[in-house]
Image: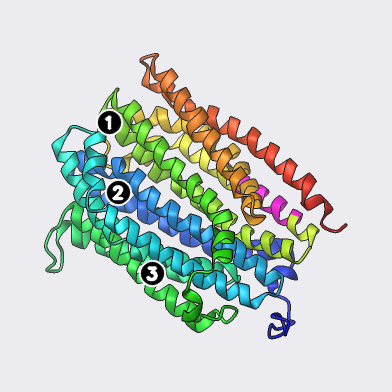
Amino acid sequence: MDKTMNVSTSENKMGIMPVNKLLWQMSFPMMISMLVQACYNIVDSIFVARMSTDAMNAISVAFPIQNLLIAFAVGTGVGINAVLSRKLGEKDQESVDKAAMNGIFITIVTYLVFAALSLFVPQIFFEKQTTDPIIQNYGVTYLRIVVGMSFGLFGSITFERLLQSTGKTTLSMVSQLTGTVFNLILDPIMIFGYFGCPAMGIAGAAWATVIGQIAALVVSIILNLKCNKEIHFDLRKLLPDPKIIKMIFAVGIPSIILGSVGSVMVYFLNIILGRFTKDAQTVFGIYFKLQSFIFMPVFGLNNGAVPIIAYNYGARKKKRMTDTIKTGCIGAASIMVFGILIFEFFPHLLLSFFDATPEIYRIGEIALRIIAIHFPLAAICIMLGCVLQALGKGVQSMLVSFVRQLIVLLPVAWLLSLSGNLNVVWWAFPIAEFASLMFTLFFYKKIYDKTIKHIEA
């Protein structure tokens, strides 16, 4: 019997709804939830900064490990999203179900590996980054909790991606908002000790983060089981299927590497900046928190575009794909223009949220203004990159990231650091993003000419 026989002949909204309306309907809930998540990241750091500059520095130095967790979780989710959305477009229910359950299997295995690494990696990591025993102690305490209990992070991202893959982005937003609200409420309570809770300091910040992630996981599982009828959750399909796992990893592994490259970049850039002053490392950490407020909505737009492009690629609808790409690029560029204006005109205000010292103000105002120059270029790179992801060309996305962060940014930052002028080092970001844009345009033209252009033929 044809395996698509039991699938409803009704078309998913990703194949029929007007593209402009569809993209914003798909993206807006994720943009809002990611904005709230960005606010949580900023507020989380603000509370930690109230403890001490050393605590804030420890959180900044810990970022590469946290980013590595997110890279594995999101990369796997991107693979699941692309495969599942494509199979929905092809009306292949069996593969839809297998993609979902094998994605959950991969998530479980990934968490167990990181849980084991949490026993010894944090200590080694901080010993390589700083010789300050106070910062080391703060950082190791924070990472052991966040990494060791990261099942909430991995699970929530996977189940949220399942909701996104079938167009239920509003439900995905509910899950993310739940985790964020829990974290925001618990942060001050557990860090400073309110309402009978002992003051746990930086450990409290870690536990607030973990509990928020677990809350998001619980809600996302419930929403999938109750509302995501386009996926049949069958534990028998949790057993690994090599063919499906290969398809997920074809997109997922390059995305994981792409995200992990950011961790490598931050690790080595912190070493370069540390040769000037630890305040430079703190400024860099603050920048990463602040820029997420601008980048997260663009990534929300990206996440909304990926399943639309993948679905219509499976359904062989070329115009809907190109309309999605155009609308996404215009929307992303508009968001980034807003971001560059804030960073250029209000850097002092942005830094004031983190109890900045005079030295951090001096370094940070210059840094934020220079780095923000690359925002509009990044918008185009992000949105064209989602085309590569949706069509299973994750290797090209990975190469673009390598060019930007390892091949260009780090060597340029190191060369500029030889001048002895810290302010010059920040120019590595705009230079690297320009190189990234050139490579992104090259790969996009190549995939358009080879694949998209000939779909209707």
Where 252 sits versus 101, above or below? above
> Looking at this rendering, what residue extends furthest in the front direction?
242
Categorize mark 3 by other alpha carbons within 10 Å: few (<14), some (14-19), many (20+): many
Question: What residue is at 43 percent from the left and 33 percent from the top?
Answer: 368
The residue at 43%/70% (across/down) is: 175
Q: Which residue is mark 1?
A: 279
Q: Is residue 24 left or right of residue 239?
A: right
Q: Which residue is mark 3?
A: 216
* Residue 145 placement: quadrant: bottom left
Determine which quarter of the picture holds residue 417.
top left
* Residue interval drawn in magenta: 322-333
**Residue beneath label 2, please?**
45
Work out whether 113 lies above or below 163. above
Please state which of the two labelled residues, at mark 3 or mark 1, is closer to the viewer.
Answer: 3
Give the image location of residue 86, x and y in percent. 66, 65
Q: Earlier in the sequence, mark 3 or mark 2?
A: 2
At a point 13% along the width and 58% down the height, the residue shown is 199
Residue 93 visible (yes or no): yes
